[in-house]
Image: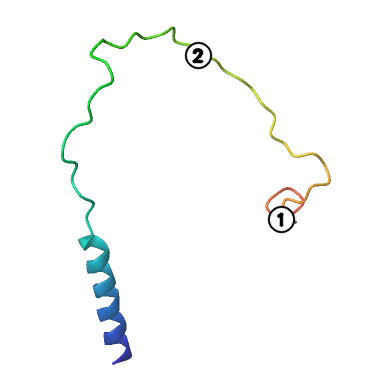
């Protein structure tokens, strides 16, 4: 009986969670201007960063000191 009640509650929650829908947009938002957008120069870069923590900081059992 307890298992059946649990299954019914899970099914009810699933139906309620899937049943709620967001309202559909009524119209597309108007653009601020009708002029085409001008693309600026494309900037690309790379970096190298050392993310090793300084000695003495605990790694909470997930580092080399977790033996």
Q: Position of residue 47 (x, y in %)?
A: 61, 20
Category of crowding for the residue at label 1, using alpha-carbon neighbours closer than 10 angstroms: few (below 14), some (14–19), many (at least 20): few
Instruction: Please identify the quarter of the rendering in which residue 67 is found.
Output: bottom right
> Image check: 59 left or right of 4?
right
Q: In which quarter of the image is the N terminus?
A: bottom left
Query: Label 2 belongs to which residue?
Result: 44
Q: Position of residue 16 (x, y in %)?
A: 24, 67
- Counting from the top left corner in percent of width and height, residue 63 is at 71, 49
Of 54 and 22, nearer the camera is 22
Label 1: state its secondary structure. Answer: loop
- Residue at image position (54%, 15%) is 45
Residue 21 in which image quadrant: bottom left
The coloring applied to the image is rainbow
Q: Name the residue under label 1.
A: 60
- Residue 1: mark: none
Q: Which numbered disc, 1 or 2, marks the residue closer to the eye?
A: 2
Identify whether 59 is placed above or below 34: below
The crowding category of the residue bearing disc 2, from other C-alpha atoms within 10 Å (few below 14, some 14 to 19, many at least 20), is few
For image coordinates 23% across by 13% down, the residue present is: 34
Q: Distance between the residues labelled 1 and 2?
A: 37 Å
Locate residue 15: give its quadrant: bottom left
The residue located at (74%, 55%) in the rendering is 66
User: Closest to the observer: 16 or 23?
Assistant: 23
């Amino acid at each position: 009986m307890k298992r059946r009640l649990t299954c019914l509650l899970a099914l009810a929650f699933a139906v309620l969670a899937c049943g709620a829908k967001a309202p559909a947009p009524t119209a597309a938002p108007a653009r601020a201007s009708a002029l085409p957008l001008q693309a600026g120069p494309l900037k690309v870069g790379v970096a190298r960063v050392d993310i090793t923590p300084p000695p003495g900081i605990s790694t909470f059992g997930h580092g080399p000191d977790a033996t």
